[in-house]
Amino acid sequence: ALGREVPLGRGRAAAAWGAFAPPLRVLWAWGLCPSWSVNALVPGPGLDASNAFSSGLFEELAKGVAVLLLYLVMRDEFHDVVDGIVYGAAVGLGFNFMETIGYMTYLDSLFGPYAAGFQWYHRQVLELFVGHAPCTALLGADIGSARQLPTRRQPLIAVACGCRAATAAHVPWHPWLPLCPPGHAASPLAPVP
């Protein structure tokens, strides 16, 4: 396994898949969740926690499905934990790229090009390797390890644990947003994956 390389074309395909497939599912899920949470919860910590958990859950499930589909399509090239980490991180980088474009477009329409530039710097420089890529790499690692497990039950448990780990790693980023509104001293460093 050491010394083996993931072909660049497959890594690009994983990033492209992460850029287009998961964001569509996340947008669909986000259309359902906020309407429920705003109607069911009082504004405050409960609503913030619900938004943080639902965004982590929906985004990681969507990216996890993308990594799982890559595993099913490229089963001969998906050997172990290292391949899972590489393909998972590539899907996470693609997702981060598309999410950055979405936020840049939105903020440019509201506040102008400086806000869009700040969003690019924030997502592509400050948190590129601490946001979506490592969360999805966690899930990819468990999908890669599932390939090596002997019984039918163990891979399912490994993938479920990977999904829980990725969601748990993603959720803590979101509660920072209400604590650091624009203009707050800590807002440039407050991650919002």
Image (tube, rainbow, N blue to C red):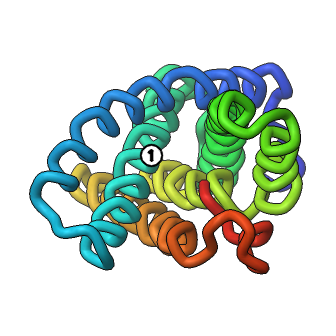
Q: Residue 69, image x and y in percent?
A: 45, 28
Residue 116 x %, y %: 79, 39
**Could you say whether the residue bearing mark 1 is in a helix, strand or loop?**
helix
Q: Is residue 102 above or below residue 128?
A: above
Q: Which residue matches tag 1?
A: 59
Along the horizontal axis of the image, is 30 left or right of 37? right
Q: Which amino acid does label 1 sit on?
A: Glu
For the point 71% across and 41% down, which residue is it? 93
Q: In which image quadrant can residue 53 be found?
A: bottom left
Apparent side of residue 152 relative to residue 25 in the rendered image (left or right): left
Q: Position of residue 125 (x, y in %)?
A: 88, 54
Q: Which residue is drawn at 77% across and 25% down?
A: 12
Identity of the residue drawn at 43% across and 71% down: 168
The picture places residue 160, in percent across and down from the top left corner, at: 31, 58
The one nearer the camera, 163 or 115, is 115
Splitting the image into 4 quarters, where does residue 109 fall? top right
Image quarter (top left, top right, bottom left or bottom right) of the C terminus: bottom right
Mark yes or no: residue 142 visible.
yes
**In the rendered picture of this protein, how many numbered marks are placed on residues?**
1
Mark 1 is surrounded, within 10 Å at the Cα level, by few (under 14), some (14 to 19) or many (20 or more) other residues, namely many
Report if residue 90 is visible in the image: no
Q: Nearer the viewer, residue 129 or 54?
A: 54
Quarter assignment of residue 141: bottom right
Which residue is outermost to the left?
A: 40
* Residue at 57% across, 59% down: 135
Q: Which of 74 and 152 is in front in this view?
A: 74
User: Would you say 80 lies left or right of 32 here?
Assistant: right
